[in-house]
Amino acid sequence: PSGTGEVTAICPPKSESSKRVVALPDAPVGMCAAHLAGASLTSADLDALVSTAPDGGLLRQDTWRRRVWIPALYAAGLCRVEAAAWIP
């Protein structure tokens, strides 16, 4: 983010052996395909971000956790009441 002195870099894997192929069941493959189609992404968009923040930028783990994950846990009754203080 601007003004924080933080730098984010997206880099390729360090080596060819760092690349991974992950087998997925049909259900998540279908969900991913629908998501990519909805974002107008194709196999030609090799440098595109698959999931983005609302502004189209990078998803930041700390912001996503605070804005999405913790409230979802709380709403599902899976989070201790004390954790509600983390919700913005």
Image: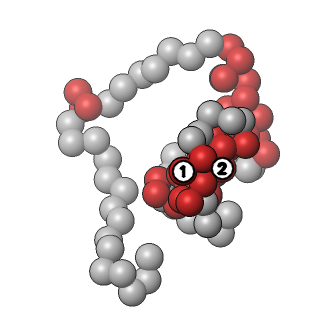
Asked whether, in this view, residue 73 is left or right of residue 23, the answer is: right
| Residue 71 to residue 27: above or below | below
User: How many other residues sit within 10 Å of disc 2, few (<14), some (14-19) or many (≥20)?
Assistant: some
| Residue 7 to residue 77: above or below | below
Real-space Cα separation, disc 1 to disc 2, in angstroms = 9 Å
Q: Residue at x 32, y 30 (%)?
A: 19
Callouts 1 and 2 close, C-beta under 8 Å? no
Give residue 76's quadrant in the image.
top right
Towards the viewer: 18 or 59: 59
Task: Report the residue marked by disc 1.
Answer: 83
**Three-letter amino acid code at the position of disc 1:** Ala
Q: Residue at x 62, y 34 (%)?
A: 78
Q: Position of residue 43 (x, y in %)?
A: 60, 39
| Residue 33 to residue 57: above or below | above
Towards the viewer: 51 or 70: 70
**Foreground label between 1 and 2:** 1
Mark toward the start of the polypeptide (1 vs 2): 2
Towards the viewer: 51 or 73: 73
SS label for mark 2: helix
Q: Residue at x 54, y 50 (%)?
A: 83
Q: Position of residue 53 (x, y in %)?
A: 61, 60
Q: Position of residue 5 (x, y in %)?
A: 30, 80
Residue 71 circle label:
2
**Three-letter amino acid code at the position of disc 2:** Pro
